[in-house]
Amino acid sequence: MAEIFRQSPVIFRALPINTEMREFWMVVLEYENETSGQYLVDLSHLTKWDVQSSDLSKLRPAGLKIPKKPGDCLLSDQILISRMNGTQASIWQLGKKTLPSSNESNYTDVTESTTALAIIGDKTFSITEKLSSLDFLDPRKTPPFLLQGPVSDVTCQAISVSKEQGSEGLMLTCSRAYSSDMIAAILDAGREFGLTPAGEGRFNSWMRQLNE
Amino acid sequence: MKRLENLPTLRIDSSHPISFNYKGKKMQGVKGDTLATALFSNGIRIFSRSLKLHRPRGLYSLDGESGNTLMEVNGIPNLNTENMGLKEGMNVEEQNVKGSANHDLFGFLDRFDKMMPAGFYYRSMHKPAKIWPLAMNVIKKAAGWGKISPDFRKSGRYEDLFPNTDVCVIGGGPAGMTAALSAAKKGLRVILLEARPQLGGFFDYRKRAFNSGKSLFERALELAQQVKDQENIRVFKHTSMIGAYNNNLITAFQVGGKNDYFKERYIEIRAQSVVVATGCIERPLIFENNEKPGVMQVACAHRLAHTYGILPGQRAVFSVGHNLGLEAAIDLYDLGLDVACVADCRETGHDPELIDQLESRKIRLLKGWIALEAQGKKMLNSVTIGTLDRSIKSVIKCDLLVASAGHTPISGPLSINQAKLKYDAQTNFFLPTDIPAKTHAAGRLFGFEWPESIEASGKLAGLKAAADCDVSCVTEIKKVQKSLTNLPGPEEGNKTIMAPVEGRKSFICFDEDVAIKNIKQALNDGFDVPELIKRYTAAGLGPGQAGIPGHNLPLFVADFQGKSPDSINPTNQRAPLVPTSLATYVGAHNDMAKRTPINDLQIKDGGIFRRIGIWERARYFSEDLECKEEILNVRNNVGMLDGSPLGKFRIHGPDALKALQRVYISNIEKLKPGRIKYSAMCNEDGCVIDDGVITKLAENDYYFTTSTGRAGNTVEWIRYHTRYDNWNYHLVNLTDAMGVLNLSGPNSRKVLEKVTDSDVSNENFSFSAVIEIKIKNQIPVRAMRLGFVGELSYELHVASSFLPALWKIIEEAGQEFKISNFGVEAQNVLRMEKCHLILGQESEQRTNLLDVGMGFLWARKMSAENKVGAVALRQASEDKTRLKLVGIKMDDPNRPAKDGSIIVDKKIRGYVCTMRKSLTLKESVGMALVDEEISGVGTHLQIYEDECEGNTISASVIKMPFYDPDGRRMKI
């Protein structure tokens, strides 16, 4: 009998060894052989919001101020807010915290719209450099910062989260339907550096490392 | 050949042999060799034959300035062996020879050069016309640059790289390295590109003193070490720049080494500032037979010995025009070369120290002498030298003629970046002027020869580049500028580029066999500037990218015309500056396509996929391309189609309706919750660009669909057309967020009823209605009652992550009703039978709403001024000259016309949009856009298909729709 489940757009050819069901999503916490130091994590199941307003300064998602300048980001208390342009921002719920104001008409849940990924490891930007001309290491910008443009020829929102030695990492979203080719392109680019799929646990420990 | 050993400049490792095959014969080179140097060390002197005249060609330069050493390597022709690193097991073959390079049966063509004057292929063999194909075949067989099998698959991994940097330095010689170091010391990110496998440039192989403490090659090593130690300098060796574009976008390609992950990679560098320090190539000396094997450039001979440990000959004559020629003669003499004499066409400008050294070695220096002719059947065996006025001549036996007229700056990177070139009398160079902002030049390309001057100019350029990146260094720039003015400036360049000879076999371009006489012919034919001469004679059009003709062409043209070089411009250079393979440009080749959430499930179900726009879609579900089973199953039972690529949007906010009213041609205001409105969008010309349905979710909250092809443009389209209104609405593209399962066929309700508790009866859920239901009490679905394929149908819109589960649930529930997949081709036929349109298929760019019979959508009573396209539609509504969409039926029911075929009488009267053989109707039917005057039902049409050779096929206009004209089946 057919079961009810939600399927991530990301399908890794790796063996999950620790999983968790969340509202019909099977979230992989850990894959076998996560030892390379360079990780690609599927975050497509995390809730993401599109928020639009002619005056974003009046909105306080999760009590936080939306950054003023397009490209600026705020990472606080498991909420990541990226200012996209003058009237639009995106919000990632990285933990269990929900947005109290999300029922307002300014907000649209776009979790399903995107493939969301994190690339973690000291070779993160060597990998992205093979895929994109976006300057994730721009010395004039302080992480986290958002760049919008092509990664492997697909328009993406990419957030350079950390370029500090030892905690390098980047998060990106692209249209959900590009997932298959995007994953293939990233893993192919990362093969020489040992990039391997990793579960959400790896992402969470990276977040903890950043907080520390 | 035994290699020279214990030279501190060597870049080879003789203890590390590398085997390769040359024409099936096993040979050996050593680590660090290029393929050309390995061949040379194995005694190969004739590498190839020339393009047209099949003259023997040998090693002349070492940086790929000509096609002399192009060979077929591992099955790939046209590879320049001069700058190709030797690898174990390479298989090398000659190309463009009949027989062998040593004994080429086409070698006789050299005697028929008079039959191939400048531009002969533009003027001869054209009349009578039938000669041309014959002649073309003969020419193709006799000339060419090798062959490759169409099935050949290139091995190896090709990649891309897109680095960003503050400063990009092109050229890893002394100027480039000092530029990189000075910018990097300011804390900037620096990228340094070097075409050779090592840094050092023209310091790298020279043992002459840099200063009292060290030699030039030691200084090169010292600088290279400093570069290596500077963490913020990224060095790309074996990397050639190929293009420069706006905003300092520099393109290059890198050849991978043994330990690299790639074979070659294409690099796009975005830099704040660029420094060009590419130095010079040698300026070929023009004399009779100046390309005969045994003749080579100074740096070629010098580097063969100092870098690769190969003595280039036994007995040599030098014919040079610069001090590096004297230095090379001294160095090579010291290594055992018998130097018969050094003919130097200059009367003055000789370095006294070098003259002393020549004298101490008893090497004759003949000032004002020049090589007149190289002799020998295939290989050089003697050379005639003489004074510039030819009053004295002498024939000297030798196997090596080292010849060079001077130097030519490598200005290509600057000129493709829009710098201008202007003649400079001091250096006899065409120097870059009007260099664009944030681009700088340094080093030898300005004519500097003095080592410290070169470095100072590099440092200055590096600091200027740093200043471009907002680093404050004005004081330092002034200081370096001052020190540079105190150092020796650009040296006087030799003005003589050609011996006093007639020029029949004095080649100005080796690649295309263009001799001086051909240039004279072009001038006599009226082609009086280098750009025209280049095209008429093909000089500089070969794979050497004008490396040999370079600036010799404009200098000769000026001289021959009795003009000052001031008045003449060199030919333009264009990307790619260095030839590379298409595979390198293609790089990693990530072909990015969109796939629906049930892509894999459809593959398992036997879906045959085709790329449709940006989507991979299941077009068929069997090898039957007419989709008989798929179509009949929808008509008789129930089918399921993946409609996820459909554009899907939410628009909400106080002014959402106003925005919809602006872009949709209908009146959306009348739309009630729970109902669906079908409408279309037009452009400003009234041409229909999109159609879809709109539903009202709540007050000021709408959900609408667009065609797949327009989905990517919809947000911009609506924002553009409301940009001045300051309306408050929010627009979100949900195309990827929502998957769509299309359930169609008379049994579709029965299937749906099995999986939901909601009332989906016709009474509660009628045609054109939308309801929110739950599948299995869990999966929220927006269900729309539509009928694109002309049957009872449901469009089930669901969160993409739920679509695979929904698909499986529906598939399982539908088994008892013979549910099966149908693909987009079956859908195309089904909707065509119903005459439902697909925009883009039944319309083209000029087709307006009225042409396709969709005028009923237009809210004519609304103000046209505020509705995109309405004004134009009003103007077009009485126009009788437009094409009209009609239904057509072929006279032969088994012979559908091809889509796109034209409808003709005495002229073109329209075209077939879509036509298929209808299994339901047992007729070949379709839709066509035709002139209004032939659009009446019953009109006979003649259809002209491509390749029909004038035999048209007949059809007639029929009423639409063809299937279920009353629409009962959709509404059951």
Image (spheres, coloured by chain):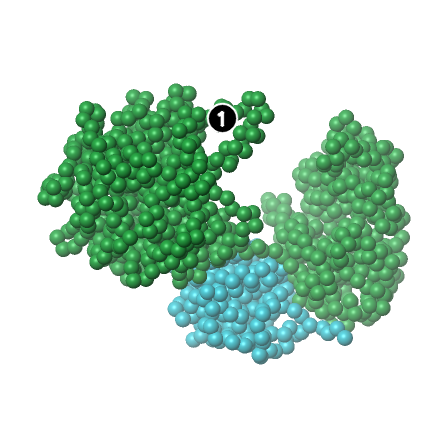
Q: Residue at x 47, y 38 (%)?
A: B144
SS state under label 1 = helix
Q: Which chain is green?
A: B
Report whether residue B233 is seen.
no
Q: From the viewer's perspective, tell me whether residue B125 is left or right of residue B864.
A: left
Residue type, mark 1 in image: Tyr
User: Nearest the camera: B182 or B506?
Assistant: B506
Identify the image quadrant of the C terminus of chain B: bottom right
Place of residue A134 in the rendered image (x, y in percent of width and height, measured from the top left): 46, 56
Q: Residue at x 19, y 49 (%)?
A: B336
* Left or right: B122 in relation to B724: left
Query: Quick check: B145 above or below B463?
Result: above
Residue at 49 percent across and 68 percent down: it is A195
Chain in cyan, by letter, is A
Q: How many marks?
A: 1
Is the residue marked by circle 1 packed among few (<14), some (14-19), or many (20+) residues within 10 Å? few
Residue under label 1? B122
Q: Position of residue B642 (x, y in %)?
A: 73, 59
Q: Position of residue A64 (x, y in %)?
A: 52, 67
Chain letter of the residue beneath label 1 in the structure image: B
* Depth check, front residue: B832 or A113: B832
| Residue B564 seen anywhere in this rendered image of the structure | yes
Q: Residue B412, located in which quarter of the rendered image?
A: top left
Taking depth in this image into account, of A194 and B137 the one nearest to the observer is: B137
